């Protein structure tokens, strides 16, 4: 199958690389909208418009993966309505797995402002994590720093406070932040880090074995 992967910046490349390792039988093409990145500090209407424009080259693919939590939150519903013959798979914060695994009932969500405050994210929290204490550190500028290869410039002060206060789980809610996992794991070795690419791979495998529409 031909799998298209979209992100506003470098996150899509991280996802494409991992999916190619997990599911090497498929072909992958990744595109980014670097001109308008990052999306996470834009309005939902702006994100939706930009996402619709950016994914046009991928519409010939069998599956289009929105490897961008922000684009998923703002645009996946309208994309599915506008392009009913295209299968879209989106990245969303792993609230349900975090709720199932956290023992302290205290987690840290690393996401853009647009993702952490999105109605889709609020719905996930209401359905699966209503009893959780969820810290959302300010990650403004993180995606830009990662796109510019300034990974070491990202500071974890607020993450450290969250962990010190009892958080036992960090959710990677932006694919850019996959680049930070080695640093997070080294600084917070006692904390579980959740990132959804494995789950996305499982979903692609399911779709690959379904009959054509």
Image (cartoon, rainbow, N blue to C red):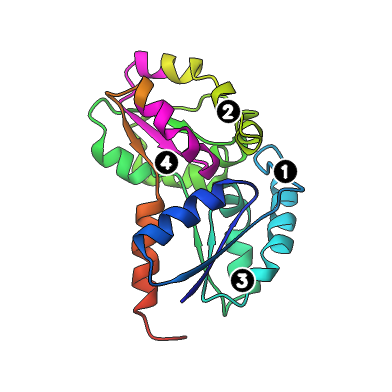
Q: CA distance from mark 4 to mark 1?
A: 21 Å
Q: Is residue 91 visible?
A: no
Query: Sequence order check: which comes first, mark 3 or mark 2?
Result: 3
Task: Give the label on residue 125, or none.
Answer: 4
Q: Is residue 193 above or below residue 94?
A: above
Image position, residue 107 (x, y; %): 37, 29
Nearer mark to the viewer, of 2 and 4: 2
Residue at point 63% right, 57% down?
Answer: 75
Nearer mark to the viewer, of 3 and 2: 2
Pointer 1: what residue?
43
Residue at point 63% right, 74% down?
Answer: 59
Pointer 3: what residue?
81
Pointer 2: what residue?
139
Badge 3: few (under 14), some or many (20 or more) residues near its Cα, within 10 Å?
few
State which region is magenta: 162-185
Quarter of the figure with residue 135: top left
Q: CA distance from mark 1 to mark 3?
A: 20 Å
Q: CA distance from mark 2 to mark 4?
A: 19 Å
């Amino acid at each position: 199958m031909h799998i298209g992967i979209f992100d506003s910046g470098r996150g899509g490349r991280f996802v494409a690389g991992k999916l190619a390792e997990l599911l090497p039988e498929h072909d992958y093409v990744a595109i980014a909208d670097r001109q308008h990145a990052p999306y996470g500090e834009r309005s939902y209407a702006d994100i939706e418009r930009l996402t619709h424009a950016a994914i046009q080259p991928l519409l010939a693919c069998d599956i289009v993966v929105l490897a961008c939590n922000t684009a998923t939150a703002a645009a996946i519903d309208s994309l599915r309505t506008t392009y009913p013959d295209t299968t879209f798979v989106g990245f969303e914060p792993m609230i349900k797995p975090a709720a199932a695994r956290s023992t302290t009932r205290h987690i840290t969500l690393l996401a853009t402002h647009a993702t952490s405050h999105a109605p889709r994210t609020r719905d996930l929290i209401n359905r699966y994590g209503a009893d959780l204490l969820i810290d959302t550190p300010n990650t403004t500028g993180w995606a830009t720093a990662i796109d510019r290869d300034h990974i070491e410039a990202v500071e974890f002060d607020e993450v450290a406070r969250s962990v010190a206060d009892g958080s036992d789980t960090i959710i990677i809610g932006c694919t850019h932040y996959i680049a930070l996992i080695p640093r997070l794991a080294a600084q917070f070795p006692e904390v579980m880090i959740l990132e959804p690419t494995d789950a996305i791979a499982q979903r692609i495998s399911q779709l690959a074995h379904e009959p054509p529409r």
